[in-house]
Amino acid sequence: MLTAPDVPARGAGRFAPTPTGRLHLGNARTALLDWLAARSAGLRTVLRVEDLDPRAIPDGILEGQYADLDWLGLTYDEGPNVGGPVGPYRQSERSDQYAAVLRALDGLGLLYPCWCSRREVRKAARAPHASDEGPVYAGTCKPARAAPLGDLDRLPQKRGRDPALRFDVASAFARLGLDALTYADRLAGPQRFDMITRMGDFVVRRVDGIAAYQIACSWDDVAMGCTRVVRGADLIASTARQLLILRALELPEPTYAHVGLVVDHAGRRLAKRDGDIALTELREGGVAPSAVIRLLARISGLPDTADLGALVDAFDLKTLDPGEVKLPPPPWF
Ligand code: GLU
């Protein structure tokens, strides 16, 4: 069994961007709300870079994200550029820890190798459900009886393919005596996930050997002493998977608050590819960061000010609306 790592006594909030694209106004709102929630509760602020697959990170994006956050005045007590007691703060430098988490889960008999291609997963999927991660896995490679696999670096190939590793949700439920995964979201309220039928066995290590986001994120929140997770509502189903991992390993759980996503005035979700709302573009175009903070505060129902100190003083997570947040029609600045 893994022991819970030593972490600073003072808890933390965290902002955990994946540097695959430029940050946009929606990401900035999440970063701001996480930062305000942490600062107003006297917690540490952690910046964690979720660059699990460094080959997927385009040149310049990471530096752009650092510059955007600095420009907004969101400073972090710990992170890749400032260091800290529970680093490294880039996931690409933490793969040995994720391997240990996978070994611990395997010790409980909760993993199995899966040789299915994406296409095979889609074809065999139980219609009509699809989870946020795609089709619910039909269990094609699932063994009749769960057992530890042993050396996870020497799993056999099948049909010339290396396997991914999947997490056996039903075995974890049986172990924990669960019939659904439940938790109380600090913003979205009580949550219940019928994970076996609605989500299925999810990938925890990719075919190329890289740990999946669910492993890295759940472990890092614990290992970095992040006690309060504030993140976008698109990740609420991931929370079920992450909590199941933590509960199976008997590790401490952070609290979670999922904040509504930002949509444009026409109701479309913002995407990193939409250059017009990229922070880098605004920064380089001469927009004042105070104007951005003020816009974000206004759409979030916070005091109409760009003064971060005043926003910290007035902040109360419970007053946020967990629903989608609409930007007014441009121009905003
Ligand atoms: N890295 C994830 C993203 O950029 C967020 C992870 C998290 O906040 O837990 O979508």
Image (tube, rainbow, N blue to C red):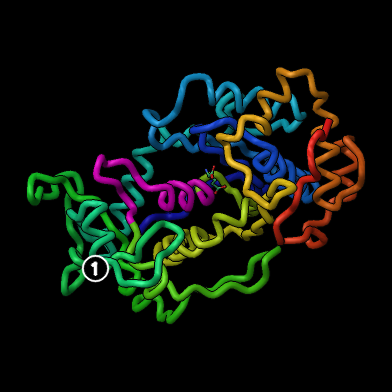
Picture quarter with the N terminus:
bottom left
- Give SS at disc 1: loop
Magenta segment: 203-222
Q: Is residue 256 above or below residue 266?
A: below
Furthest-front residue in this view = 266
How far from the left and from the top, in percent, is residue 7?
56, 46
Q: Nearer the viewer, residue 241 or 68?
A: 68
> Is 221 in the magenta?
yes
Q: Is residue 64 above or below residue 235?
A: above
Give the residue at the far left of this rendering: 159
Q: Dot 1, crowdedness within 10 Å: few (<14), some or many (≥20)?
A: some
Residue 134: where, in percent of width, then height? 39, 58
What residue is at 68 percent from the left and 52 percent from the top?
267
Q: Looking at the image, which is closer to me, 178 or 222? A: 178
Q: Residue at the location (25% across, 40% down)?
A: 208
Residue 302 placement, left or right of 283: right
**Residue at label 1?**
139
The quadrant of the picture showing ligand 1 is: top right
Give the amino acid type for the residue marked by disc 1 in the picture.
Gly
Quarter assignment of residue 32: top right
> In terms of depth relative to the viewer, which is nearer, 93 or 117?
117
| Residue 330: % across, % down | 79, 37
227 sits to left or right of 205: right
Viewed as shown, does residue 222 lie left or right of 130? Answer: right
Tell me: residue 109, above or below residue 277.
below
Classify 150 as above or below 19.
below
| Rendered-image quadrant of the C terminus | top right
- Residue that appears at 60% across and 35% down: 274
Task: Locate residue 168: give its quadrant.
Answer: bottom left
Is 84 covered by the magenta stretch? no
Q: How many marks?
A: 1
**Residue 133: horizontal and vertical position, in percent?**
41, 57
